[in-house]
Each structure stands twice: as C-alpha cells, then as structure tokens.
C-alpha cells in the first residue's frame, strides 16, 4: 500500500504515505483503504484498532496516528499468508460484512461491557432477524371477525376494524417471535442446535433489555451472553470470509 510505519510505543504507531496528488479527495481515499486494512487486522487479531488523528500536508503526504488496544497492549503479529489471501475477499465483501467487521472492531475498543453488549446485540439483530410472518391466515382472520361481529358489545363498533388490523399485522401477532427467528436463522447459518441457541438468545435479550432500561445485570451473566454473541458473530464472519464462501 506504500505506507511507512513507525512504532511510538506498545499502544500507538504512526503511518506516513507520500502521494503524487495534492487533491484532498485522493488522500481521503487512501485513508479509507488504510482503515479497511486496519479493520481486517483487528478482526484477525481480535484487538481494537482506531485512527486517532490524521494530517494531510501540502508536500503532499498523509500521516495518521493509529492506536490499537486489546486484553493486553502488545504489538500485533503480522498477518499470515492465508489471512492475506482472505483480505482480498474482505475488500470485496458486502456492506453487511464490512459493517459487521467494523462493529466487532468497535467492541474490542470499548471498556464498558454494557456498550459492548448493546453493539453486539444490534449487529446480531441486523444480520439474523427477518420479516415476521402473520400468525393467522386471511381465512382465519375473517372467521374470527365474523364471530366477533355477533357479540353485542362489538356489533357495529369501530373496534372491529382495529381488531382486524391487530389480527392481520405480523408485527403485533407474528407466527414466530423475534428471538425465535434470530435463533433459527443463526442456527441454520452456523449449523447449531436451534433450541440451544434460542435459550441463549432469550437470556441475551433479557440482559440487553436491563441495560437499555438502566438496570444493572449480573456481571457474570452479562459476560456470559457477551461471550456467546461475540463467539458466534466471529464465527459467522470467518465463514463469510472463507475462500469457498459464495455469499459475500
């Protein structure tokens, strides 16, 4: 990529690249290429990497300062030959996969378990949730409405139309709950036991709901569901970046 890197300390390093153009748009494009590479390194090494600051000089030169963090501060080992091959797949991956990688990188950087879990859950919903199907068929809805119309308290009432909307709306009366849909899609994609995944997804949604409503969850419980989501999302990402994958 033509970058020169210099280690500042165990947490920071500096990168510089000389450009043949003084156009700032060209510099921004080079910065995005670097950001893509750093995101890929982050998911390969399971460490958080971010660009702390950058400067575009008139020379012309582009020089960002980059920080990476993880369970321990250390210099990340170089990418293997297989990882370098998969980088080509990552560059051409779908926006969904790129967003997933960026989200995981963000969680590696965050110190708050609450924020990490909320981001992991949001990624999980975005990838594995789908549109709900209605619980009742049209004929079943009409049969229920025919019976309801005979009730003295509902005969001629506007509530009958509200009942129709409620019975026909899959978001209000779905055939399968959101957690069930996420679990089944995740289990199918990763070849897992659907009921086991469902139990863990239920636990996870409860903990996330506590955090969103300002209620503290049990520390070990929160760590457990975070590990569960992170492990499966990393596994899903690895599958999508495998050379044999055709779904990127």
Image (spheres, rainbow, N blue to C red):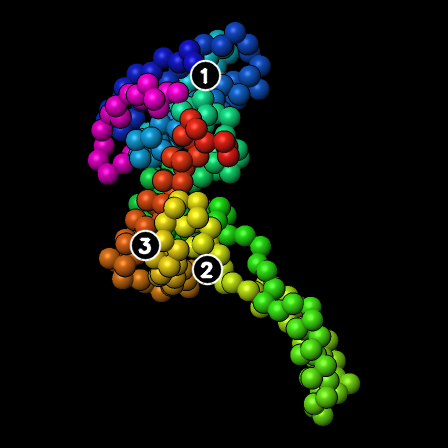
- Mark 2: give few (<14), some (14-19) or many (20+) Cα within 10 Å: some
Compared with residue 71, is residue 131 higher up or lower down, i.e. above or below? below
> 220 or 73: nearer the eye?
220
Q: Quadrant of the N terminus?
A: top left
Label 3 vs label 2, nearer the camera: 2
The dot on residue 62 is: 1
Residue 60 placed where, x, y %?
A: 49, 10
The residue under the point 31% across, 35% down is 46
Label 3 vs label 1, nearer the camera: 3
Residue 73 placed where, x, y %?
A: 23, 32
Secondary structure of the residue carrying tag 1 is: strand
Secondary structure of the residue carrying tag 2 is: helix
Q: Which residue is mark 2?
A: 180
Q: Earlier in the sequence, mark 3 or mark 1?
A: 1
Distance, label 1 to label 2, CA atoms, is 48 Å
Task: Look at the image and tell me whether residue 53 can be seen.
Answer: no
The residue lying furthest to the bottom in this view is 152
> 148 or 211: nearer the eye?
148
Main SS category, magenta section: loop
Task: Look at the image and tell me whether residue 26 can be seen.
Answer: yes
Q: Are marks 3 and 2 in contact (CB under 8 Å)?
A: no
Q: Which residue is mark 3?
A: 225
Distance, label 3 to label 1, CA atoms, is 41 Å
């Amino acid at each position: 990529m033509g970058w020169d890197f210099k280690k500042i300390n165990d947490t920071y390093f500096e990168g510089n690249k000389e450009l043949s153009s003084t156009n700032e748009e060209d510099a921004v494009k080079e910065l995005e290429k670097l950001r893509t590479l750093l995101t890929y390194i982050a998911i390969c090494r399971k460490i958080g990497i971010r660009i702390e600051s950058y400067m575009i000089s008139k020379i012309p030169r582009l020089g960002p300062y980059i920080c990476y963090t993880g369970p321990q501060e250390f210099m990340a080992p170089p990418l293997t030959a297989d990882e370098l091959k998969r980088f080509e797949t990552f560059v051409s991956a779908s926006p969904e996969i790129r967003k997933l990688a960026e989200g995981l990188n963000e969680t590696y950087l965050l110190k708050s378990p609450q924020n990490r879990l909320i981001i992991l859950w949001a990624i999980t919903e975005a990838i594995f949730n789908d549109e709900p199907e209605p619980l009742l068929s049209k004929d079943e809805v009409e049969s229920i409405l025919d019976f309801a119309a005979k009730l003295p308290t509902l005969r001629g009432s506007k509530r009958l139309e509200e009942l129709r909307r409620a019975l026909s709306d899959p978001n209000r009366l779905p055939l399968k709950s959101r957690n069930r849909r996420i679990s089944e899609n995740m289990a199918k994609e990763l070849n897992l036991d659907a009921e086991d995944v469902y139990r863990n997804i239920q636990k996870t949604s409860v903990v996330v709901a506590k955090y969103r409503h300002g209620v503290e969850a049990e520390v070990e419980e929160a760590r457990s569901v975070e590990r569960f989501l992170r492990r499966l999302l990393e596994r899903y990402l690895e599958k999508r970046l495998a050379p044999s994958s055709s779904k990127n």
